[in-house]
Image: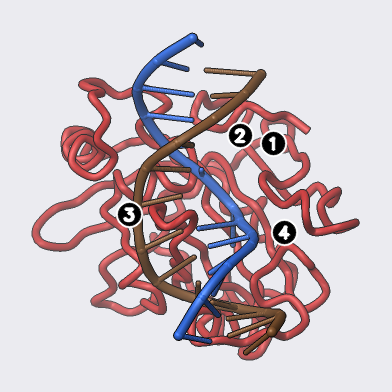
Chain colours: A red, B blue, C brown
DNA sequence: CAAACGATCGGCT
DNA sequence: GCCGATCGTTTGC
């Protein structure tokens, strides 16, 4: 079943980042469906988290969606090329989000490979970790785009959503460490707000 | 209006 | 392990 609004509007974004591991991210539009188990996440928590785009309550045209009620997508472009997918959480005005950094394909693998060849100019022919590991890679595989930022994950006609497959992820299968690429965030850089499923091969290497 | 800067990726050494 | 690509957003003058 799809995760309900109440899953996203909880106030502890770090807990939500943990809870998203093992859940299934599904995209379905233009008659094409792809899905993958979420294997790696990072929590971002404005206003005091310097690594967050909405740090110090900074609201711009780009980050405005982060301030809305949880249960939407915040998708932005990084390094001019990569579209990074985040799940907005918390109440209206909170500016919390979880970056999805890795998925393990479970549906539409062929389509994922086609999209990666087209958008990422990779020559991959089979499913392997590089297909959907890394925040910029999984959005290509799932067909997600920054133009979809602000879309609801709850609406009946949503083009993408997250499902609960029903099986619990054992606590011992979850590891945590520093977030990646946020060295300039001062003391916030040390926060262990990155989580991954140790039972999967679909997460990035740095383990601390 | 100009300039610097990324929550990265993939190829090559 | 290192390095260049690439461009929308933000910030500074």
Marks 2/4 same chain: yes
Q: Position of residue B2 (x, y in %)?
A: 51, 75
Viewer-nearest residue: A60 or A134:
A60
Mark 1 or mark 4: which comes first in sequence?
4
- Quarter of the rendering containing residue A48: bottom right
Q: Work out whether A95 lies above or below A31.
A: below
* Inter-mark Cα distance, 1 to 2: 5 Å
Query: Relative to residue A136, is residue A106 depicted above or below?
Result: above
Task: Give the image location of residue A134, x and y in percent.
Answer: 49, 40
Relative horizontal placement of residue A31, taking residue A185 as reference (left or right): left
Q: Which residue in the protein does label 4 denote?
A: A15
Is disc 1 in contact with disc 2, using a CB cutoff of under 8 Å?
yes
Q: Residue furthest bottom?
A: A93
Q: Residue at x 52, y 66 (%)?
A: A87
Q: Regarding mark 2 in the picture, which secondary structure is present there?
A: strand
Q: Residues within 10 Å of mark 3 (few under 14, many from 20)?
A: many
Q: Which residue is mark 2?
A: A197
| Quadrant in which the C terminus of chain A appears | top right
Q: State how far apart marks 1 and 4 are (Cα).
A: 12 Å
Which residue is the site of mark 1?
Answer: A174
The CA span between labels 1 and 3 is 22 Å
Are dots 3 and 2 in contact, CB under 8 Å? no
Q: Chain of mark 3?
A: A
Q: Secondary structure at mark 4?
A: helix
Earlier in the chain: of badge 2 and badge 4, it is 4
Q: CA separation, marks 3 and 4? A: 21 Å
Answer yes or no: are tags 3 and 2 on the same subunit: yes
Disc nearer the start of the sequence (1/2): 1
Which residue in the protein does label 3 denote? Answer: A26
Q: Say which residue appears at 57% left-offset and 42% top-offset.
A: A40
Of A162 and A151, nearer the camera is A151
Q: Are marks 3 and 4 on the same chain?
A: yes
């Amino acid at each position: 079943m799809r995760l309900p609004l109440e899953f996203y509007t909880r106030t502890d974004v770090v807990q939500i980042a943990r809870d998203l591991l093992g859940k299934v991210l599904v995209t379905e539009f233009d008659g094409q469906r792809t899905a993958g188990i979420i294997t790696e996440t990072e929590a971002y928590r404005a206003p005091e988290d310097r690594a967050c785009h909405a740090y110090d309550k900074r609201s711009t045209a780009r980050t405005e969606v982060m301030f809305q009620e949880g249960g939407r997508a915040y998708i932005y472009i990084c390094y001019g090329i990569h579209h990074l997918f985040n799940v907005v959480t918390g109440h209206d005005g909170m500016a919390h989000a979880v970056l999805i950094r890795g998925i393990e394909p479970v549906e539409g693998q062929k389509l994922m490979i086609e999209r990666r060849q087209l958008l990422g100019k990779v020559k991959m022919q089979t499913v392997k970790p590089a297909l959907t590991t890394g925040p910029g890679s999984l959005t290509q595989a799932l067909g997600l785009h920054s133009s979809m930022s602000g879309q609801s994950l709850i609406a009946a006609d949503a083009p993408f959503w997250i499902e609960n497959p029903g099986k619990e992820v054992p606590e011992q299968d979850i590891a945590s460490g520093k977030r990646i690429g946020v060295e300039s965030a001062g003391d916030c850089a040390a926060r262990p707000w990155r989580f991954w499923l140790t039972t999967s091969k679909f997460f990035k290497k740095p383990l601390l």
